[in-house]
Image (cartoon, rainbow, N blue to C red):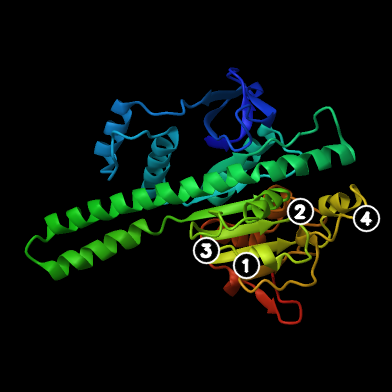
């Protein structure tokens, strides 16, 4: 599994490689890390940032990339090629995952592997320096993580911009390959060539790219939209899933409506979410009602709100897209499976006009 991070990295080959503070070069500095799950732990391998000239030429040849090999290219290109090829071959969607408060890297990895197993997707986590407990706890840890979340917004913004650029590059490459394949099959029949090209591209386009932000990960996403120079409002993802959002419900439409997607922006709410109720209490009176636990003023014109309050198996759960909640309720699992695979799930739900929400 590949992780994207703006955490400080050390030379350790274990999870001790990941620090609990931003990269020493600044909070916007990004690194790609490969992590393999072993029987007795984890093997961690931070990738060299810059690709060698020979590697760039190899990638250009193998994937028919329209790139200038004299320019600098980075590990993200190689990883994107590998993931795109795997997604196409296995017919899986890619799900980028931004975790929440108090998650160390092992927490993130365990969640990511469980999501892959549950929903048959390829998960790529973006991990920012949440404390995971650390030397402080309670209110102090929560506020410290909010500070780290704010300064990590630039790194997430850069990540989304890179995803968009590489997706466009690889999609263009794929179109050229499919055009050549269709022409070779029907060199003297333009109509048959065009028909085959359309069929080939339709099969390839079944692979979707989606974003899951959980808890305070939504706070990071929100702050990517604080300036006009952001990548998040570009057309990058099929679905954006804002689950248990630890952000203000008040005026949330101001930033949610800036999100652009091919399919849907989903906001999932559990009014009984114990973690969000606790987060509201910890910092004091200034902490307003959280978007992920409040069923009023749901008014963003481009969002579909899904109310899972009182759904069987959820209770006061905060991470109800995994664990016992979905293991006990297959209908809920089907909804998340659709969202994480770039599908539209409203037809599976009942619309509550008075609340502007969808319910199981």
> Can I make out residue 333 in this image?
no
> Can I make out residue 29 in this image?
yes
Circle 4 crowding by C-alpha within 10 Å: few under 14, some 14–19, many from 20? few
- Where is mark 4, residue-wise? 285
Q: Position of residue 212 (x, y in %)?
A: 61, 52
- Where is mark 2, residue-wise? 246
Circle 2 crowding by C-alpha within 10 Å: few under 14, some 14–19, many from 20? many
- Where is mark 1, residue-wise? 257
Q: Position of residue 310 (x, y in %)?
A: 80, 64
Q: Secondary structure at mark 3?
A: strand
Residue visible at 56% across and 24% down in the picture: 44
Q: Position of residue 338 (x, y in %)?
A: 55, 61
Q: Is residue 67 left or right of residue 268?
A: left
Residue visible at 57% across and 53% down in the picture: 211
Q: Are marks 4 and 1 in contact (CB under 8 Å)?
A: no
Label 1 and label 3: CA atoms lie apart by 11 Å
Label 2 and label 4: CA atoms lie apart by 15 Å
User: Closer to the camera: disc 3 or disc 4?
Assistant: 4
């Amino acid at each position: 599994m590949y992780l994207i991070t703006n955490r400080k990295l050390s030379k350790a080959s274990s999870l001790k490689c990941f620090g609990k503070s931003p990269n020493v070069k600044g909070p916007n500095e990004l690194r790609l890390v490969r992590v393999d799950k072993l029987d007795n732990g984890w093997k961690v391998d931070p990738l060299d940032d810059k690709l060698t000239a020979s590697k760039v030429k190899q990638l250009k040849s193998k994937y028919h990339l329209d790139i200038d090999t004299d320019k600098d290219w980075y590990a993200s290109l190689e990883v994107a090629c590998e993931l795109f090829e795997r997604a196409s071959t296995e017919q899986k969607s890619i799900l980028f995952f931004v975790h929440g408060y108090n998650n160390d890297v092992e927490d993130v990895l365990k969640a990511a592997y469980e999501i892959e197993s549950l929903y048959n997707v390829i998960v790529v986590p973006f991990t920012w320096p949440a404390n995971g407990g650390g030397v402080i706890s309670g209110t102090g840890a929560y506020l410290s993580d909010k500070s780290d979340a704010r300064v990590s917004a630039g790194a997430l913004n850069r990540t989304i911009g890179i995803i968009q650029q590489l997706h466009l590059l690889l999609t263009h490459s794929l179109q050229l390959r499919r055009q050549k394949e269709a022409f070779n099959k029907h060199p003297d029949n333009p109509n048959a060539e065009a028909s085959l090209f359309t069929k080939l591209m339709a099969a390839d386009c079944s692979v979707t790219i989606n974003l899951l932000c959980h808890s305070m990960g939504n706070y990071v996403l929100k702050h990517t939209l604080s300036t006009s120079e952001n990548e998040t409002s570009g057309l990058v993802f099929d679905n954006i899933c804002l689950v248990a959002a630890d952000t203000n419900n008040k005026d949330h439409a101001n930033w949610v409506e800036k999100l652009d997607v091919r399919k849907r922006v989903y906001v999932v709410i559990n009014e009984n979410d114990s973690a969000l109720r606790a987060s509201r209490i910890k910092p004091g009176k200034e902490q307003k009602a959280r978007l992920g636990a409040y069923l009023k003023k749901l008014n963003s014109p481009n969002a579909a709100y899904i109310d899972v309050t009182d759904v069987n198996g959820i209770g006061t759960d905060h991470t109800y897209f995994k664990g016992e909640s979905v293991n006990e309720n297959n209908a809920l699992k089907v909804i998340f499976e659709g969202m994480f695979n770039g599908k539209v799930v409203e037809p599976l739900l009942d619309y509550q006009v008075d609340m502007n929400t969808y319910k199981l």
